[in-house]
Every structure is written in C-alpha cells, then in structure tokens.
Image (cartoon, helix red, strand yellow):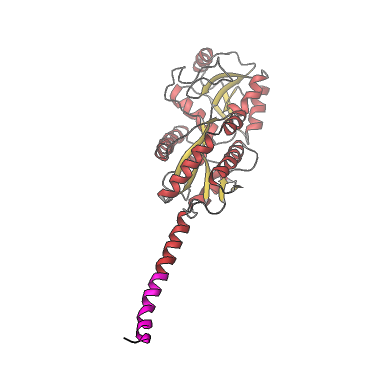
Amino acid sequence: MNRRQLAHRAIPFAAAALALLGFCASASAEGAFPDKPVRLIVPFPPGGTSDITGRIFADALSRELGQPVIVDNKGGAGGTIGARFVAEAKPDGYTLLLGTSSTNGTNSAVYKNLTFDAVKSFTPITRIVTVPGVLSVNAGFPAKTYADFAQLVKASPGKFSYASSGAGGATHMAMEYYKSLSGMHIVHVPYRGTGPALNDVIGGQVQMIYDTLASSYPYIKAGNLIPIAVAAPARVKELPNVPTFAETGLTTFNADLWNGVLAPAGLPPDVLKALHAASLRALRNPALKEKHAAAGAYVVEDTPAEFTQIITTDVAKWKKVAEFGHITAE
C-alpha cells in the first residue's frame, strides 16, 4: 500500500476522532452548570415582601453557584405574568421563579384562563421562607382574645366584616378558608392593596384583617391592632401570648404564606441536584436567616419532592376554598 492510499484511509479515522473530541467537549460544557449568570424572576413589582425575599436569596445563591443571580421583576396579573414567563422558558437552570403561595397556589383556583399548570409546568427546588399570617382586630373591637372573638362573631352572623388586599388574593383566600372551617359568617370588604385595608381596620370602618405578620406587626406593637391568632406551626416569638390556629381547635387550618424557588418543567436531574444543593447552602447561611427574620419570614428547607407535594396539596385546598366563597380574581 502506497503513501497516498494510507493517507486516504487515515482521513475517516481522523474525522471520527475530531468528531468524538468535539462531542466530549460539548458534553463537558453542558455539564458545567452554571457557566453563566442565572436569572431569578420575581413575579411582583420591586419593594414588596416577595421582592425582598428574592433579593436576599439571590445574593446568597450567587455566592454558592459562583455566578451572578440577577433578580428580574416581571409583575402583573397577581404574579401570573412572571410565572408564565418561567413556565415557558428553556429548562436549563438559568431561568428560575421566585414562586409564592399565590403564583403556585391560590392563583390556580381563581384565575380561569391560565396557560400554565401550577404543578406540571415547573420543577420545584425548595421553599425559601414561610411568612406567618395573623388575624387581628382593631383596638376598639370588644373581644381581645380568640375565645371571646369566636363567641361574639358566631353569635352575630353577618354583623362583622374583614378587609383584604383584593378579591382573589392570598389574604382573601385565607379568610374564606378560615370561614369554611370555623362556620363563621363574616362579610368581605376588598381593597386595592394592604395599606388601604389596614388603614380602614385601624380606623374602625372594618373590624378585622388577616395579613402577614410582617405587615401587621408594627401596628400590633403600636397598639392599633389586637392579634387574635397566628397561622404558624408554633407560636411566634414576636407574639408569644397569641395562640396558633391549631391551638384554637382549627388543627387543619394552614394558611401561612411561602416563597420558594422553581425552574421550568423538564429540568435535567444533574442541574436540579446542583441548584438544590446550592440553595440549601445559601439558606443555612446565618446572615441570610437574620435578614429574613428582620423581614418577618422564617427560613425553611424542602426536598424537591416535599416541595412538589406542598404545591399539589395547596392547589387542591384553594380550589375548594374558591368554590366555597365563589371567588374569582379581579
């Protein structure tokens, strides 16, 4: 065999070797997650509780991943615009959702034309925080304890009213959930935002409100609101003398609010593993816990399976509540 024939035969082998090297390099690059910045979509405007939570988490997560985690606010339609954006994004780990008990819970019950599924369209990674809720009355309300409150309200169906930040919102849904379990008839008065709702409760136009502890606590501390019960697994340190709803006998009432991190459905298992591990490391950072505590939130950790089950249970629960209260979003 002459040199020309040998060279001709060598060409296919060289091409095959180059192709194999190219495949290995490509596979290596794809496996090196993350190799560029990650975007965390916060589906609400800047400045709110979810935005604060998202920015605290993004800062800690960026240190664990070794890449910037950029917060991108995509607010509107009760969080559904940002959630849809992530649901339709490429499932590569570079677009994440700061999900909430609204975006992946109550919204599925009150928005009738969603183009994504709260469970199937996402890969849950872990919850980040839970935010206790608190049922409070204004300072002029005649009942100051839960026992007296329950006795008075049950004896006067339809006489008292509660304020919410808007029809179909998380606090509205929580109170309707409470009504469905307690058998109380309390009139709903919707507002456009938590601020106006709190103002009218404090002013006496409306008797009570269910809201996050973070929003209500300054008014409780000032004596403008009287806390009746809190939605949390145990009594909160800010209100050690106020019972949980479970302690009042409503053992199935679970309406604390949560924030969590999710990716689009179809996230590769190795990327999920990397994001979950980095998220847990970030959540265990003492500085992060202190920042969240200052914002009225408690850090939690879930496995992806646990988080998926929480969302699945929430969706079923809120659909029943929406049917009970005939609730649809504004």
Q: Which residue occupies 60% across, 29% down?
A: 290
**Looking at the picture, does residue 17 appear above or below residue 307?**
below
Q: Position of residue 40 (x, y in %)?
A: 56, 47
Tell whether 220 sits left or right of 261.
Answer: right
**Looking at the picture, does residue 226 appear above or below residue 324?**
above
Q: Which residue occupies 35% across, 85% down?
A: 5
Front in this rendered view, residue 326 or 276: 276
**Is residue 17 located in the magenta-colored stretch of the structure?**
yes
Q: Quick check: can you spot residue 108?
A: no
Q: Position of residue 130 (x, y in %)?
A: 52, 31
**Looking at the picture, does residue 242 appear above or below residue 83?**
above
Front in this rendered view, residue 329 or 214: 214
For the record, the magenta segment spans: 1-18
Q: Quadrant of the C terminus?
A: top right
Q: Quadrant of the N terminus?
A: bottom left
Q: Which residue occupies 57% across, 44% down?
A: 62
